[in-house]
Amino acid sequence: MSVRAWADIYATHIRIAIAEQFQYRVANYFYMIGMIAEPIIYLVVWSTIARQQGGQVGGFTPGQFAAYYIVWTLVRNMNIIFTPYGWEERIRQGELSGMLLRPMHPIHTDLGYFAGWKFVVIVLWLPLAAVLAFLFSPDLDPRPIDVAVFAIAIWGAYLIRSVNYWILGMLTFWTTRVGPAFEIVFTAELLLSGRLVPLSLMPDWAQQLASVLPFKWTFGFPIEALVARLPEEQLLGGLAMQALWIALGSIGVAVVWRIAIRRYGAVGN
Amino acid sequence: MTDRPVGREPLRPVRLFGLYLRVGVLNELQYRANFAIQLFQSAIALGTGLAVLALVFGQTDTLAGWSQPELLAVMGVHVLMGGVIGTFIQPNMVRLMGDIRQGTFDYVLTKPEDAQVLVSIREVRFWRAVDIVIGGVVLAIAIGQLGGGVGALDAVAFLAALVLGAVMIYCFWMLLTITAFWVVRMDQIVELFEGVYQAGRWPVTIYPGWLRLSLTFLVPIAFAVTVPAEAVTGRLTAETLALAAGFAGLLVVVTRIFWRLGLRRYGGASA
């Protein structure tokens, strides 16, 4: 297929997602408010500690924590992808059969659709961010290069997470008891991505572990790109690491998909 | 047809609940492997919670006046209450939302029992009760670490606070669910609740004023988790407990009124 055809396909998925999700504004808002509870909790806990310790902990002041966790809310929303739990229904109800009839890899449907949803989410997020900024007075003063890298990095994060959780979700082709495996990955992600706390607050061994895993490139890196005034080489190096993980994940999707799809008839209908 | 008074048999809802409980338990006992999975997931959640506590207390000795064992007690109550919610409350609410959306709520209305009672008791996720046990164990360990033990009066206050908290969480969940009569697609609400419920992992006193008030009266997590935890850490006053009782009563009444409004809305929408 030509580049033009691909662009058309993606544009169509994105348009459909925007039209569809915008109808469910209230449901989307509930979802986003539920999501915002999590970073507010972290923010309050760590700001309290920072204040108790005389104004900062691990190099973060309450204002910097506020910036970190408010930016977190956008990054978290960018990181919404097709849930690995969704594969069970796809396989059990035979939805996948329809997807297989299309002349392209089914991951493009998910990538396009969820990318479109992001535009709705970002519009809905802006007022929430304004309220949060008013409540918690973040200390945020990014340079143009920080903003530029952030704008790319949130989409990089989206792609890394999409391909990784596609691979994980495909476990469902082999077993229906996927919950425990998913939970392990989710927990590792929570602890080693910068989602729970900025990684600099974690013990050294955890930071080292995080540096060889993909998770920090989906949470910690995009957030820090905007809030932490990283040196230029770290910003660009981070984008390169994101590209590397996207490439690895894409290869993973291609390989696992090819093996997994052979099992489809056996589990499905 | 719908809100038929229970009348001369005040214990009928309790008997019905017993019946649904038995069916629910029998149903889940067929899937023993799910018990292992639940145990595993609860263990992971517990491990994560402990890791967070360790991170916090790696940096400080107390958090807003709460020591490490005291926060462990809060966590125990949080897990325990989460188990109660996951076993008895949430599954019913999720099913009700589905019924309203798909129109199968009609089947509830045709039964000769109060509809609110029915929709509140018909689902039991027995294996989630693992969290009730784990929460209890964490709480017991915390009390052991605190050293002072818990007096009989405190124990009674703790149980009372726990029951009142569960009632309030039920009402809150019910109020959220009832909005499905107006806003049809509510599947995200589970995420909303679970997100907000996480706030209960910490005593509400650490939150800024506006948030503390919201977590007390808007989403009654303060009453459900912090207040019972206060009972076992010797912080609970009689006034707080009385406030909890009064607020629980108020919520029950409001929920009932809102439920009737919702029912009227349903009739108009589906037929």
Image: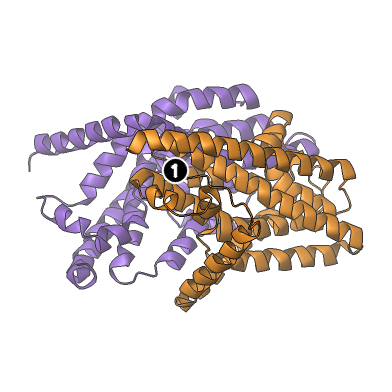
Chain colours: A purple, B orange
Residue A13 vertical placement versus A193 (above, below): above
Q: Nearer the viewer, residue B84 or B8?
A: B8
Residue A163 vertical placement versus B222 (above, below): below
Image quadrant in which the C terminus of chain B is located: top left
Q: Position of residue B187 (x, y in %)?
A: 42, 45
Residue A151: which quarter of the image? top left
Residue ID for mark 1: B188
Q: Position of residue A194 (x, y in %)?
A: 54, 47
Q: Residues within 10 Å of mark 1 (few under 14, many from 20)?
A: some
Residue sticking out furthest to the front: B8
Q: Residue at x 67, y 45 (%)?
A: B168
Q: Is residue A30 left or right of residue A137?
A: left
Residue B85: which quarter of the image? bottom right
Q: Residue at x 46, y 57 (%)?
A: A212
Residue A96 vertical placement versus A32 (above, below): below
Query: Is residue B129 something that shows in the picture?
Result: yes
Q: Is residue B133 left or right of residue B191?
A: right
Query: Is residue A234 something that shows in the picture?
Result: no
Q: Position of residue B245 (x, y in %)?
A: 77, 44
Q: Nearer the viewer, residue B81 or A231?
A: B81
Residue at disc 1, secondary structure: loop
Q: Residue at x 78, y 67 (%)?
A: B141
